[in-house]
Amino acid sequence: MDRETQAELDAVRESFQGELERKAARIAQLEKLIHEVDHGYRATLSWRITAPLRAIGRLSRTLRR
């Protein structure tokens, strides 16, 4: 493989690597946001009040299987 072709491949590889790193960083940001929203909602009165209903639903689904 000549130097020009190798240089082009290296440039493409670096470009892909940079794009993967940016996407990985964005995914990490979104996962953190999801965790924060989930944690915030689970701390609400609504979540605590409906917890028994969710437990009953899980139990009934388990018994139906």
Image: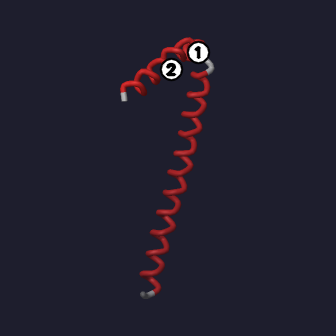
Mark in front: 1 vs 2: 2
Q: From what the image shows, is residue 22 above or below residue 32?
A: below
- Residue at 57% across / 45% down in the picture? 28
Q: Earlier in the sequence, mark 1 or mark 2?
A: 1
Determine the CA span between mark 1 and mark 2. Answer: 11 Å
Residue 47, image quadrant: top right
Residue 65 percent across, percent down from the top left: 37, 30
Q: Quadrant of the N terminus?
A: bottom left
Q: State the mark number for residue 55.
A: 2
Q: Does residue 19 appear left or right of residue 41 in this picture?
A: left
Counting the numbered discs, the total is: 2
Residue pushed farthest bottom? Answer: 2
Residue 32 percent across, percent down from the top left: 59, 38
Q: Secondary structure at mark 2?
A: helix
Q: From what the image shows, is residue 23 above or below residue 14?
A: above
Q: From what the image shows, is residue 7 above or below residue 51?
A: below
Residue 20 percent across, percent down from the top left: 50, 57
Residue 42, image quadrant: top right
Residue 39 percent across, percent down from the top left: 61, 27
- Residue at 42% across / 81% down in the picture? 5
Q: State the mark number for residue 48.
A: 1
What amino acid does circle 2 point to?
Ala
